[in-house]
Image (cartoon, coloured by chain):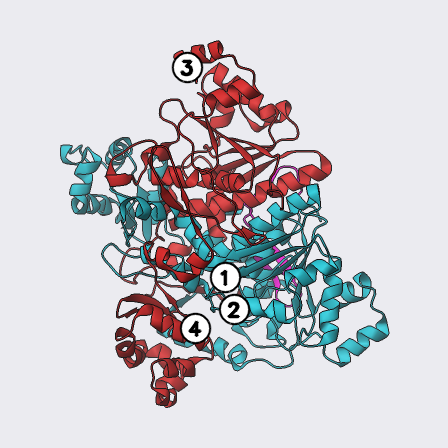
């Protein structure tokens, strides 16, 4: 496959969100990522989230949108790591891989004899990236961490919220993204060095430390001034206006960063110049009035129209977009941020790249569908490792490998039934025309219509 | 002792503000030789951003600049002047990477388009970071961290339901773009070592930020579901949010299937039989009633104590730490996460060591440069510019 990391093989022992986000970025850059699950424990919660058309039907674990989003471009095998034969096959794969990626708690790899020292015996130049919430060492190394935990422990959550109000969580599991993104970054750095010097690496990425690396200026402000950054809404110091404003059909964010921008904004919204607002200090002092002034104008327009008018006047502005808006956005459509992927269980569905960078020297290859459970067992174990047909059959019989989970947790069959509850509670909105809208925007039959 | 990751790699850094500099900060942290080109006299605008010690503005004491520019060399050059441009071209000839984050028209207008850079050095990797990418209907649009946050899905799911959508604290879109740019740049450099050819990497901050959607695109494309803003309520379960305790706030989350542990935590094991503990759907429909069962105990205890007990029960709790409280954190102290660096103007300050550790330690941090600190060294030693020429260039404001 074309891609800057073509020829690199990554043994992917990660699960859930953060680890798979990291290995997905590497897969998108052309690395061969072999994702390991087990029939005793398939990748959860992702394999039970967002079933196509919210229907249980056949093999729901192969029809989960969230699993696909996280694991497109990867190959998938099953191996029972509680069994010595399963471990032996992992060890064989380590020998022929460049990178091993994992996000278990630190004890787990040691207990499986898959810690760095053990891996190095098998493959002296292997790169091991261990992604965790709190790090591989230290008194809290065994803490269980979800995304919000890493954000809170990283110091970011205390800075999120309306001015003067209590802290709030991110709306998109940001901590997982930050951990995965830095996991991917550290792997390519290690690959680069290894190619020149033959040295492997043991990389320890702590999600909460990566989050703190994203608020370094606040750390230094504390170091300088003993000042604790508090929630400040959408503001940025005292620049005004710098917030979201209500439109006819939603919201638009406007960021006036200097007096010139302010003057242009006044001209655009047909406001006479007011000396009280001419300077940043003046605008900050009278910010409620400034806000009302701007919002009177935005409220009469759709977010899309306001966006066009403001950008033509050279003012930084952006509408608040939801997932549907982004998928239908003309700029995104032209940039091909989303591409349809054909998956045998769900038909053609739109997916974005996790590494959307454009490389002038690489052809853009179509993305490949996320693996069904154990889909590449034969490819990897037989064709790559040389396991013969008898050995393969024995592994299947002993459920060391397989193509369907042994049992599903109740949540895998119960959660889809919650949609009406969530809609009633206002936690979600349902758009029944989703497939038609997307098919029309992308000029082809998508989803259930494409099978 | 292992070699630095990017030993022998030279970067000509044309970036400013946040996104580009975070990328080149990580390059410097990894051992690359980063030559930061700054405008004469004023330098990178982040030198004016602050925060400053005692809130007194000073171009060598801006926290944002100091943090983002650790380990780099500063050379002042005016790219708009012919001689400034040709000096940059000479640096580019011997470099491996160029990183820039101007809007797409700028470099070509200065005679430094990718095509020109490539002619000078075909092995060059040129990374261009911009708001919306080098192509597309919005490519010349103006944007900031706030406006790009608004457009990249997250804000539509953040904040209170009856108020304006809320961005994350700080400048997250720009940091996201920076780390993506790093990964893509080194990927291209890795390829260059194999086939000998450089290339151009186009990073859009909008796209980088839009990859952080927590599956929102697929929940729409597979099910037609759109998430809404709802404080402390998540479609996937309750509780899963921020709660007050005696001395602050914490993340309260039993984790799926672990609700009995929460009853144990609040020292009322019999609560495990309470209808709102047993029935997760009832809990989701009556969240305030549920919260009333656990809040009194939480409010009577301190965050570190609660988290220690909760984690012993394998529940993913965390204190909501302020930036100041990070310095009291036992885990960070044990990992030596903060390093003290001296700076001739800003003094001794504590810096986060970095977002990953290799081979059990963080690399040592070097301070941010003074404006033009390395101009003479770089132009003189590397390009052979004489002291007299340098004096003339300074007088003419080119350097």
The quarter of the displayed image where residue A104 is located:
bottom right
Q: Chain of mark 3?
A: B
Q: Which residue is mark 3?
A: B394
Labels 1 and 4 touching (C-beta < 8 A): no
Q: Which residues are magenta?
A: A335-364
Q: Are marks 1 and 3 in contact (CB under 8 Å)?
A: no
Q: Chain of mark 1?
A: B
Spot occupied by residue A108 in the image (x, y as percentages of width and height): 59, 70
Query: CA separation, marks 1 and 3?
Result: 53 Å
What's the residue at 29%, 62% (across, down)? B160
Q: CA distance from mark 2 to mark 4?
A: 29 Å
Q: Secondary structure at mark 3?
A: helix
Residue B63 is inside the magenta segment:
no
Residue that carries the numbered disc 4 in the rendered image: B311
Indicate the colour of chain B.
red
How far apart are the alpha carbons under marks 1 and 4?
A: 27 Å
Whichever of callouts 3 and 4 sits on the residue coming sooner in the sequence is 4
Name the disc covering residue A353, or none: none
Q: Position of residue B141 (x, y in %)?
A: 41, 37
| Dots 2 and 3 on the same chain | no
* A351 is within the stretch colored magenta: yes
Query: Mark 2 = which residue?
Result: A50
Q: Please determine whether, in this image, residue A226 is positioned above or below residue B312.
A: above
**Disc 4: CA contacts within 10 A as few (<14), some (14-19) or many (>=20):** some
The residue that disc 1 covers is B215
Whether the residues at callouts 2 and 4 have beta carbons within 8 Å, the answer is no
Chain A shade in the render: cyan
Q: CA distance from mark 1 to mark 2?
A: 9 Å
Q: Is residue B379 visible?
A: yes
Q: Does residue A46 appear to the left or right of A323 in the view shown?
A: right
Q: Which badge, 1 or 4, comes first in the chain's sequence?
A: 1
């Amino acid at each position: 496959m074309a891609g800057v990391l073509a020829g690199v093989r990554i043994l992917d022992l990660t699960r859930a969100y953060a680890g798979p986000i990291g290995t997905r970025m590497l897969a998108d850059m052309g690395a061969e990522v072999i994702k390991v699950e087990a029939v005793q424990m398939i990748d959860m919660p992702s394999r039970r989230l967002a079933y196509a058309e919210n229907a249980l039907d056949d093999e729901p674990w192969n029809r989960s949108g969230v699993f696909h989003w996280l694991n497109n471009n990867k190959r998938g095998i099953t191996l029972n790591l509680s069994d010595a034969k399963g471990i032996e096959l992992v060890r064989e794969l380590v020998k022929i891989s460049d990178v091993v990626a994992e996000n278990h708690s630190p004890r787990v790899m040691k207990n499986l004899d898959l810690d760095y020292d053990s891996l190095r015996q098998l493959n002296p130049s292997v790169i091991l990236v261990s992604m965790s919430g709190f790090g591989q060492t230290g008194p809290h190394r065994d803490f269980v961490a979800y995304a919000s935990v890493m954000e809170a422990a990283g110091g970011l959550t205390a800075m999120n919220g309306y001015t003067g109000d209590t802290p709030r969580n991110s709306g998109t599991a940001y901590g997982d993204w930050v951990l995965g993104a830095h996991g991917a970054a550290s792997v390519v750095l290690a690959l680069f060095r290894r190619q020149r010097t033959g040295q492997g690496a043991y990389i320890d990425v702590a999600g909460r430390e990566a989050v703190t690396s994203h608020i370094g200026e606040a750390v230094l402000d504390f170091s300088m001034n003993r000042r604790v950054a508090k929630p400040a809404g959408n503001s940025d110091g005292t620049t005004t206006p710098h917030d979201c404003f209500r439109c006819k059909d939603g919201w638009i964010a406007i960021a006036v960063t200097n007096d010139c921008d302010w003057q242009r904004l006044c001209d655009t919204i047909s406001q006479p110049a007011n000396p009280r607002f001419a300077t940043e200090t003046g605008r900050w002092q009278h910010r409620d009035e400034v806000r009302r002034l701007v919002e009177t104008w935005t409220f009469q327009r759709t977010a899309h129209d306001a966006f066009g008018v403001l950008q033509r006047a050279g003012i930084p502005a952006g509408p608040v977009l939801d997932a549907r808006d982004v998928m239908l956005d003309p700029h995104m459509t032209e940039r091909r941020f989303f591409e349809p992927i054909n998956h045998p269980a769900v038909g053609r569905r739109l997916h974005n790249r996790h590494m959307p960078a454009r490389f002038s020297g690489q052809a853009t290859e179509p993305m490949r569908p996320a693996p069904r459970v154990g889909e590449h067992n034969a490819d990897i174990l037989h064709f790559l490792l040389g396991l013969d047909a008898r050995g393969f059959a024995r592994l299947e019989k002993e459920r060391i490998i397989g193509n369907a989970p042994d049992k599903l947790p109740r949540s895998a069959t119960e959660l889809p039934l919650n949609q009406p509850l969530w809609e009633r509670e206002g936690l979600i909105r349902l758009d029944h025309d989703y497939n038609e809208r997307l098919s029309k925007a992308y000029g082809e039959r998508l989803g259930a219509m494409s099978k | 002792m292992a070699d630095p990751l990017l030993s022998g790699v030279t970067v000509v850094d044309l970036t400013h503000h946040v996104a580009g500099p975070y990328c080149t900060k990580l390059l410097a942290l990894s051992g690359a030789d980063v030559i930061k080109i700054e405008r004469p006299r004023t330098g990178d605008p982040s030198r004016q951003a602050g925060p400053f010690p005692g809130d007194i503005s000073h171009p060598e004491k801006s926290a944002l600049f100091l943090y983002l520019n650790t380990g780099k060399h500063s050379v002042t050059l005016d790219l708009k002047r012919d001689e400034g441009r040709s000096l940059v071209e000479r640096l580019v000839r011997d470099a491996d990477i160029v990183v820039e984050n101007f809007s797409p028209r700028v470099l070509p207008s200065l005679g430094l388009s990718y095509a020109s850079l490539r002619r000078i050095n075909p092995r060059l990797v040129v990374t261009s970071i911009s708001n919306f990418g080098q192509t597309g209907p919005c490519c010349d649009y103006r944007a900031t961290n706030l406006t790009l946050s608004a457009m990249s899905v997250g804000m539509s799911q953040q904040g209170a339901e009856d108020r304006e959508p809320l961005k994350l604290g700080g400048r997250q879109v720009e940091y996201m773009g920076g780390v993506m740019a790093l990964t893509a740049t080194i990927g291209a450099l890795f390829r260059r070592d194999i086939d000998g050819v450089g290339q151009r990497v186009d990073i859009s901050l909008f796209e980088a930020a839009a990859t952080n959607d927590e599956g929102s695109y697929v929940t729409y494309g597979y099910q037609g579901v759109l998430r809404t803003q709802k404080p402390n309520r998540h479609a996937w379960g309750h509780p899963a949010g921020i709660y007050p305790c005696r001395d602050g706030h914490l993340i309260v989350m039993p984790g799926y299937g672990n609700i009995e542990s929460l009853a144990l935590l609040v020292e009322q094991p019999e609560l495990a039989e309470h209808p709102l503990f047993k029935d997760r759907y009832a809990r989701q429909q009556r969240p305030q009633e549920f919260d009333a069962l656990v809040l009194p105990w939480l409010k009577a205890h301190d965050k570190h104590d609660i988290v220690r007990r909760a984690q012993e029960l394998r529940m993913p709790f965390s204190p909501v730490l302020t930036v100041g409280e990070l310095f009291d954190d036992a885990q960070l102290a044990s990992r030596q996460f903060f390093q003290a660096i001296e700076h001739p103007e800003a003094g001794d300050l504590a810096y986060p060591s970095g977002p990953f550790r290799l081979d059990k330690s963080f690399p040592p941090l070097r301070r941010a440069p003074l404006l033009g600190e390395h101009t003479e060294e770089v132009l003189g030693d590397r390009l052979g510019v004489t002291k007299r020429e340098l004096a003339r260039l300074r007088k003419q404001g080119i350097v």
